[in-house]
Each structure stands twice: as C-alpha cells, then as structure tokens.
Amino acid sequence: MVLVFIGVSFVRAQNPTPSLTANWVVKVPNADGTVRKSYFNLKQEGAKITGSIRVTQFYYIISESTGDAAGFTITGKMKDGKSERTVKYEGKLVGDELQLSTRRRPEDKPTESIAVRAPDGEGALPARLPLPALRKVPYNGLAKAPPMGWNSWNKFKGRVDDATVRAIADAMVSSGMKDAGYVYINIDDTWEGERDSQGNIQSNKKFPDMKALADYVHSKGLKLGIYSSPGPNTCAGYEGSYGHEEQDARTFAAWGIDYLKYDWCGARTIYTDEEMPAVYQKMGDALLATKRPIVYSLCQYGRLDVWKWGADVGGNLWRTTGDISDNWNSMTKIGFSQNELAPFGQTGHFNDPDMLEVGNGGMTDTEYKTHFSLWAILAAPLLAGNDLREMTPATRETLLNKEVIAIDQDSGGKQGKRVWQSGELEIWVRELSGGAKAVGFFNRSAETKEISVKWPEIGFKKNPKRARNLWEHKDLNLSGDSYSVTVPSHGVAFLRVSK
Ligand code: GLA
C-alpha cells in the first residue's frame, strides 16, 4: 500500500498585533512599606497611541506616538506654570507585560520598568475641587523671628525615619544648638503612608507612631514639623493632602505638630499657578481652625511672586527659589539673588531662600561661613540640613556662631540689601533694631581680595567708630571715612557696626 501524503498547508491565521489599549501600572515597592505606582492609561487607535501618563507628581497627556505593541514610543506633555514638561517612553508588549524604558535626559542611562494591567479608573487624577474665594487669613502670631531648627531633606532625603529624628533631637540638645535658638525638628517628604478607610492620613513604616515621636521631641523642649502637599501627591510621589486639607490639619494638630511645610508638587496636575493663593489659603485657614500654633511654611519655589501674597494666605515663610544643592554655585545663585525681595520680608512673614547646607560636605568651611552669613543678612530661616550627630569643629563653629545668629534673629525683622558691588565683590547691609548695621563684605572671586570702601558709599551718614567682627569675635576701633578688609576667595568679612 502506498501511502500518499497529501501536503496540507495550514495557513496560520496571522495573529493581529495585540492592542495596547488598557490601564497599565508599574508598582515599585519602597522600603517603608509604601508602593510607588505609575500609571499608563493607553488607547491604541490604528497607528496612534493616545492617553495619559501619571508618574509621582506629574500627569502627562500623550501627544505623540510611533509604532505598536511590538515596539512603540510615546511622548507625554504637561503644562507646569510657565513651562512645559515632556516625558518619553519606549516600550513593547511581551506576553501580558508592558516593558518600558525612559531617560531623563538623552545622555542618561535608561530606566527600565514593567507595567501590568490595572483596573479601569485606578490611578486616574481626582476631580478638581472648587477653591475658596480669596480673603486675608489672620496672622497666627508665630515666627516673630525667622524660624530656626533642622530639616531632614538636604541630608537624608527618603531615608529619614523615627530613630533618626529622635537622634537628631538628642544631638540638637547635646550640641548646644537648642540653647543657641534652634527649635524645630522638621520631617520632610517620605513619612506618609496610605489613608485609612475614613480618609485619615497615616505615617508609613518608618514612623510607627507620630504622636509618640512628637511627645519625645517635645520632652526635649523642641518642636516637631511635618510636610505635605496641596496636590494628590508630594514631590517624592507620596500621599498629599488634596481633598483632605482640613482633615490633615486636624491630624497634624492631634499628633502635636508645630510646623507645616506645604509643597506645591502634585498640585500642578490639578491647578494653575494663578490659583496658588487660593490653594494655600485653604490650608492656612485649616491650620488656624485647629487652634494649635502651627508655623505655616509655603513651598512653591517662588512662583507667582509669592512674596506679594504669602502673608495674606497665612504664610509665616515662603520659599523664593528652586531647591538648593550642596555646592557653591547653587548656594550663591540663590543667596545673592534675593536683593529685590527685601521689602517683602517682615516680622512674622519671611522670605525663605531654602534650607542650610552647612556641614554637608559639598562646600569648604569658608564657603559655609559665607552661606550662613548671607542667610543671616537675608533674615532667612536657619534650618540646618546636616547630620547633627557628626559635626566637625568648623561646622559647629559656624552653626553655633551666636553673634551671627543674633543678626538673623534681629527683632526688627528687616531683610538686608546689596549696597555696593564691584565685579565679584559685594557688600550687603542689614539694618538692625536699635540703629546698628550688619555689614557683609563678600568675595565671590577665586582669589583673595582686598575690599576697600568709604562709609558714605555704603549708606553710612556718619563714619562709625566701633564694630564687631562676627567670625573673629573681636571688637574693632574704626577711624576715618574708609574701611579696608582682606577677604579670602569665596569668603566673607562680617561686621556688626555700632550706631
Ligand atoms: C521639593 C522641595 C524640597 C523637598 C522635596 C521633597 O523639591 O522644594 O525642599 O521638600 O520637594 O520631595
């Protein structure tokens, strides 16, 4: 028997490329028990992919795309104040997982992640809530002088936890900083956990009991600060106070919180910059309603000329710039750019050029003294940002210079101004209560320089007779109508000139 094989050719029905249309989520667990979730809500129509991308504090609408499930790119854009932000992802569908990669800047290494399907609607932006009509929030009577204390962000970022905060409080006392006037221990971003079924904000695993922590800090004679955002998410992507403003203010008060830094962050996904005053007023009112004295610190990077309305929404201080980093360029770019804002700082309501970097290692000791002196002239909050448990003698000497601190805390609350400049040499003067003046001779250049001026050139009507050198702790007798001082590169000579 002859077997005849009949070739049957099965024409494989060409599987259509699967669709990307779905709600996708990338879940990255944080060590504190929270999960960072990023959502890709995609819709594929023919050759076009539309939808949105929600990552930490950002929400982008997809405006361009190429390819399909076998390999695609999506570009998302969002309006953020006056600027536009863009994000771009490459991806492909493998099985039922979306493999994604993105780069912050073209020269960066790509960050890879895997998204899985999420239920429809999960991760959607919450609906926009109405804002209160603008009215003046009464002054809470706090921050008569610029707040002094410590904040966790500059040194610890997301690593701050209960044990660290307790140890910093201990060090604040044992180092003598408490006696020098530093009082607030401020926890920055990444303490937040999920909300409970009643919508109450809870701390995450790093902070097992916020009330107990506040009790501990208070037992040392110090005060505890916390951080939140008017947006759904904080800058680090944690839970913000959006839609829970009054409730969170009550929770903070019940925990024993004494200071709130309220950081715009994810509010940019809901509101425009022009709406900032109403957004900040809402929390200003909520804090007042708790009846607990809580210093209100606005953080929105100086947008919309916050110095013009920060006090009206109940702010005791407001950031005037983007974030400081621990280097000379960043510090001087911020510090020396504050001249025009001088008229807006006053007792109870201060301009905030950001927290101190003294002792964090990115600047020389001379540069840190310049940083500290400049902040004192600016009547800036003095929030140390270093690890108080391990300070070098120079760091201690700087942060504990009581004569410089006294300039910062001067009861007049007047911010200093640039009165003279010659290239990279600058003189700044702060008028003190009682008629004395703080005078900073700054050398921003790369070499040691002599700065020589005549007193009338820098606003003195009479030639002063006596001064105090605030870093050398020496009294000086002055004579004649001029003054000369040799200042090291990136250094300062800082005088308190008597009336
Ligand atoms: C913003 C603020 C910083 C810090 C971080 C925390 O960048 O400006 O001071 O609070 O958020 O995420």
Image (cartoon, helix red, strand yellow):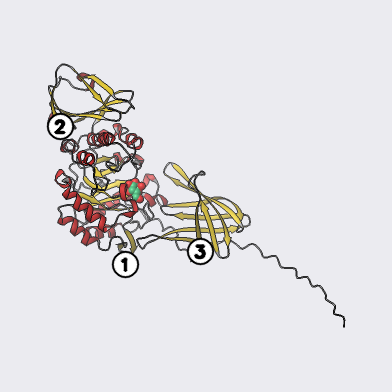
Q: Residues within 10 Å of mark 2 (few under 14, many from 20)?
A: few
**Dot 2 or dot 1, earlier in sequence:** 1
Q: Residues within 10 Å of mark 1 (few under 14, many from 20)?
A: few
**Residue 255 location in percent, x, y?**
22, 60
In front of the other: label 3 or label 1?
A: 3
Please name the amino acid that badge 2 sits on: His
Residue 223 seen in this snapshot? no
**Dot 3 or dot 1, earlier in sequence:** 3
Q: Which residue is mark 1?
A: 198
Rounded to the nearest angstrom, the CA distance separating label 3 from label 1 is 29 Å
| Quadrant of the snapshot with the N terminus | bottom right
Rounded to the nearest angstrom, the CA distance separating label 3 from label 2 is 64 Å
**Residue 320 location in percent, x, y?**
31, 40
Residue 82 has which mark? none
Position of residue 437 in the picture relative to residue 75 (left or right): left
Position of residue 38 in the picture relative to residue 337 (left or right): right
Please name the amino acid that badge 1 sits on: Gln
Q: Which residue is mark 3?
A: 116
In front of the other: label 3 or label 2?
A: 2
335 above or below 195?
Answer: above
Q: Assess mark 2: CB under 8 A from ligand 1?
A: no
Position of residue 311 in the picture relative to residue 81 (left or right): left
